[in-house]
Image (cartoon, coloured by chain):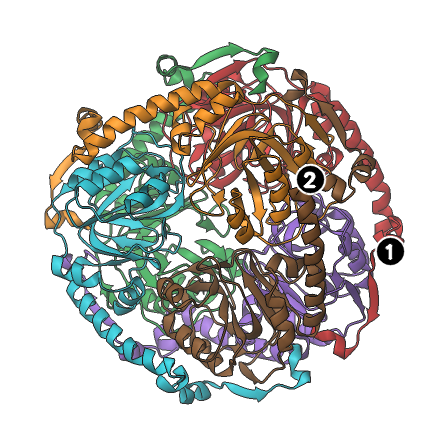
Chain colours: A brown, B orange, C cyan, D red, E purple, F green
Amino acid sequence: MTPVVVRNPPRADADAVKELERFGVATVHEAQGRTGLLAPRLRPIYPGAHVAGTAVTVSVPPGDNWMLHVAVEQCRDGDVLVVSPTTRSDAGYFGELLATALAARGVRGLVIDAGCRDVAELTAMRFPVWSRCVSAFGTVKETLGSVNVPLACAGGLVHPGDVVVADDDGVVVVPREEAAAVAAASAAREGKEAVSRERYRAGELGLDIQGMRDRLAAKGLRYVDHAPEDQQR
Amino acid sequence: MTPVVVRNPPRADADAVKELERFGVATVHEAQGRTGLLAPRLRPIYPGAHVAGTAVTVSVPPGDNWMLHVAVEQCRDGDVLVVSPTTRSDAGYFGELLATALAARGVRGLVIDAGCRDVAELTAMRFPVWSRCVSAFGTVKETLGSVNVPLACAGGLVHPGDVVVADDDGVVVVPREEAAAVAAASAAREGKEAVSRERYRAGELGLDIQGMRDRLAAKGLRYVDHAPEDQQR
Amino acid sequence: MTPVVVRNPPRADADAVKELERFGVATVHEAQGRTGLLAPRLRPIYPGAHVAGTAVTVSVPPGDNWMLHVAVEQCRDGDVLVVSPTTRSDAGYFGELLATALAARGVRGLVIDAGCRDVAELTAMRFPVWSRCVSAFGTVKETLGSVNVPLACAGGLVHPGDVVVADDDGVVVVPREEAAAVAAASAAREGKEAVSRERYRAGELGLDIQGMRDRLAAKGLRYVDHAPEDQQR
Amino acid sequence: MTPVVVRNPPRADADAVKELERFGVATVHEAQGRTGLLAPRLRPIYPGAHVAGTAVTVSVPPGDNWMLHVAVEQCRDGDVLVVSPTTRSDAGYFGELLATALAARGVRGLVIDAGCRDVAELTAMRFPVWSRCVSAFGTVKETLGSVNVPLACAGGLVHPGDVVVADDDGVVVVPREEAAAVAAASAAREGKEAVSRERYRAGELGLDIQGMRDRLAAKGLRYVDHAPEDQQR
Amino acid sequence: MTPVVVRNPPRADADAVKELERFGVATVHEAQGRTGLLAPRLRPIYPGAHVAGTAVTVSVPPGDNWMLHVAVEQCRDGDVLVVSPTTRSDAGYFGELLATALAARGVRGLVIDAGCRDVAELTAMRFPVWSRCVSAFGTVKETLGSVNVPLACAGGLVHPGDVVVADDDGVVVVPREEAAAVAAASAAREGKEAVSRERYRAGELGLDIQGMRDRLAAKGLRYVDHAPEDQQR
Amino acid sequence: MTPVVVRNPPRADADAVKELERFGVATVHEAQGRTGLLAPRLRPIYPGAHVAGTAVTVSVPPGDNWMLHVAVEQCRDGDVLVVSPTTRSDAGYFGELLATALAARGVRGLVIDAGCRDVAELTAMRFPVWSRCVSAFGTVKETLGSVNVPLACAGGLVHPGDVVVADDDGVVVVPREEAAAVAAASAAREGKEAVSRERYRAGELGLDIQGMRDRLAAKGLRYVDHAPEDQQR
């Protein structure tokens, strides 16, 4: 794969992105059939951030952040930058200067399966980052990578223009073509949960709300009263 | 081991639990001879929580949270749910709906050697969770497990009815039969530390407060003044 | 290596330490040629701490904190205690009593490639700790180690009297003899970044600010417009 | 929990142990309902070992192997020593001398959720060890633990006298009381697999042998022929 | 993404695969510009295996190997099965029966970012597997996944029909369309290395063979003779 | 720290190195007071290697092996190359060509806290390597590091000229000045163990050989006979 920068990939529909932003990562992930979730090693650098945007993807060499500067130029208002190194790297690819550049273009945040630094400054700016680690280790600018190519990032597959939703629970990717459908499924799921929530709050059991008792019995679940001789296992 | 739900195991004495709640995890762990501490990979989802309660234990398959719904019915006011998968799982077994169900029954918190999700909502509810990771990955409801059986959880052994104490330092388990004795030992330890604390604050050294100098010398500790040629090692 | 306590090693110049404290860890690390950074597994127990001080080093056996008490006596106002076990240990070597003792001597904080406990109390005291993990597991006092010897800690090399700078990004060590030079280089770097920051904020690109376009082209970077058939890779 | 050595716990029936030794770890684990498997971090120090025996359990402090010497005296012909530290330790608790002592008593092997050393010598002796790591780091003999108490080891729960089966796939624990039943279930499973194996070898598909096609269709699995436009996801 | 099985994706040219099999993973990875290497956590279950084949990809739920049976039917002579779970799983998805089924169809091996079991039997069969871990933990057959879709596996991106080369150094993926070009580049690289090897064997230095001295000097590398006072850093 | 190559550091006495080579890593580590052992993540690429030599140290940037070529020139017959990156790197710094160059100079082996590749070829050459991982990921040659400076490697501190002993148990470093003393202490330890070994083989217990019974009793160890009611803990 020779290094390449792909300009102007199609982005997911802006209305669908806006709609998806209303939902949490867990809801979106469930609504699309438990797919698209990135690995839980990606953690937000501060609590409370919740964004949705369209992916600009970047494949970077380990310890080299040159392509991030290239990628900035490809970003538009409403994008989220998604970065993955070609092999594990704990270096700090991203800090306050790049965040300033991205914020100036309306980018919503960064997802990176590597390190981030300047976290105090990024927190003060409220520029959200989901990263593998916090690391001040500096990077070089020597080797090319690619921008806006399909990317394996933290166990997930991200195409440029896909929707990225990120909150305190992590990061989920919604394929561009499915954004509207997943937003609708998310809304449906949330509606259903709102009803359940009231019943749970009133003390009802999931066993009854979801009608699980027969199936549990059919699978062979036994209930026994505690007896001292049972306690050994 | 066939799946089983044990009803009504004996709980630790409520007064002892209440007494243990006064102490930090480190104190309780030391007071019972440096045992009972669960692995430090269990971290609270928000800072500042501090609970004590009686364990309802749940052995779950990887990626399957069906038994949590079964376990809810076995919980009472003052319990803490303790969950461990039969092999490592990073799935998000627990979220806001189950927390609502547990809170409605007076459960004090959750300890789980797996993933938790909806952490923003759980934080807002102040329902404390100590978990291995934060993960939105969804679970299925296909395979049975067991409730209120002895459980290996995060390197510790937990019996139903044991006391669980959890705070910012982690999670410690106190055997049911020893709850009152450990509470008393914790109080004793804390009293002793209060005295030491004043002496430390006044600038006294642990070497003197604890009378360590002779034993250090007997073990062969040497003191030397710095000399440039010493610095190489 | 027989256990030894080295008294009165030379400390870095106090003015240089004070000057270095003005800078973030990332800046200092870059200013000294991307060296001296400790591994990112060392994390602060609470956000917002930022200290600089002179290292008092402690080599400790796994699970044994006896030498910390010995080290307290060797500490002076403005020091930072730096502790590393001879093999990996997740035990909780350090808590509120030792912090009280160190604070009474003017010590600025602790860096430890092992566990720390009493984090709620330490946070309340504002005694900052950078540690590998939070763990309440208790330690013994049976085996000697050494104080103020050169130390491998979290992948870095620390000599007694070196400057330690720590903030939300991690921990960096500056050799004692180079403290003033690194402070000057840090100031220079920060000045340069302030200029760049304004340009980034105004929407200029790093590609232009740093003049990268020619070198990227020379390395062979290609730009292509998105075409559906390109999207497969 | 005060330190204690329990003498003469009941052992699983010797014939059942002998019978279980015929089966691999995967078969036994499946035969008892996918329970009892210890974490895959336990690896054999050399390939090809396959043993079954009755557990003598040892709870040890981190970095302290004193109780292993105590445990040797409690071992009999046909036992397997099972050791777990109270918090993570990478120390090398076990080497050639202890193996010589155990071999002299007819002990079949060691399972330890910590480090092992002298692996060249142990391999030459053909004394099998399943351990978390290979580590030469030495241990002390200062702190007590317990022998023949229920033990959480590598995520599993082991009682003294349980059957331990270990091979290249890892380690599984069979509760003492269920040894004969699990041996019978293992034999049944193996017989069934032998039949399947012949069919697989002849080129039949699991889809047909296990009759999966209808259920897959009912769950909604779609088959499509490759078309270039399908390839983007 | 709804579960789907894509039939008959194009495979890389058989001659190119055969040619690529002549080269080691490191050579192929370098020849295609240091891309395509899967994470080093994938290790062979026995040393000495070296295969190349065309990828049949499988996306599987955690702890559920149902889709492996579906995938077998899609495999042809010369394929390599490539499997990745949607979130981390240490379960043992694959064992001797599936290997028998794959071997009957001429499949060359398995690459799986999860667990494998029956490693003694697989070794005896010489069916090579590169896996994240060895684990006997059993899987269920309850949830669908997809076959022959683009897959993120161990940090890399694999399309059905791509070439997979695997040996003792790990696993590398070559895009289908680039197979012949990468084979040619690998041959060129190997030819060049053969020449270098002779020069290295004769005692020449890489500094001279690769003409590095001037560039090192230009970067500022200093040579100094050892002096005691230099040794402190 | 500006990059530097230190020429001709003093080496440990050749006779002491030769003597140390007779002993295993565990013995040497114990003989020098349980110090000097590198972390157990360093594993040999093939079993059975056992070497001792004098350290040539190399500090390398992450993912950049340029300095290895520089270091080769500084190596002499009987040396061991010891390499550590300035932050974690899983790249494959070292392969067959560099091994050929080192072997031509009489270097005994490599210790590297990063990745190694060409392991099949290195095994065939019998050039031993202890590394953090096996990884084919290629490195660049862009950034300087230092040769023959004190080095933190895998948790240990290595000076140029120190003795490195490595075998199947791992790697231990003996300070240059202490080589002869540690060799003598190793011989003494081994002699003592030979006597113990015979007694263990004859069935004597460590409890008696090492006279532990009184001290165990004094610490409070209790022996009890198994009773069913004891078994719950």
Residue type, mark 1 in image: Ala
Task: Give the residue displayed 51% in from the left and 59% down from the top.
Answer: A42
* Percent x, y of residue C173: 26, 57
Instruction: Check the picture and name the quadrant holding the C terminus of chain F.
Output: top right
Task: Give the residue displayed 70% in from the left and 60% down from the top.
Answer: A31
Q: Is mark 1 on a helix, strand or loop?
A: helix
Relative to E9, D64 lies left or right = left
> Closer to the observer: label 2 or label 1?
2
Count residues near mark 1 (Cα–Cα under 10 Å), then give few for <14, some for 14-19, many for 20+. Answer: few
Task: Give the residue displayed 30% in from the left and 24% down from the top.
Answer: B191
Q: Is residue B90 above or below residue A104?
A: above
Look at the image and tell me whether residue F181 can be seen: no
F202 or F154, nearer to the observer? F154
Relative to C1, D173 lies left or right = right
Q: In this view, does B38 lie above or below E191?
A: above
Q: Which mark is residue D218?
A: 1
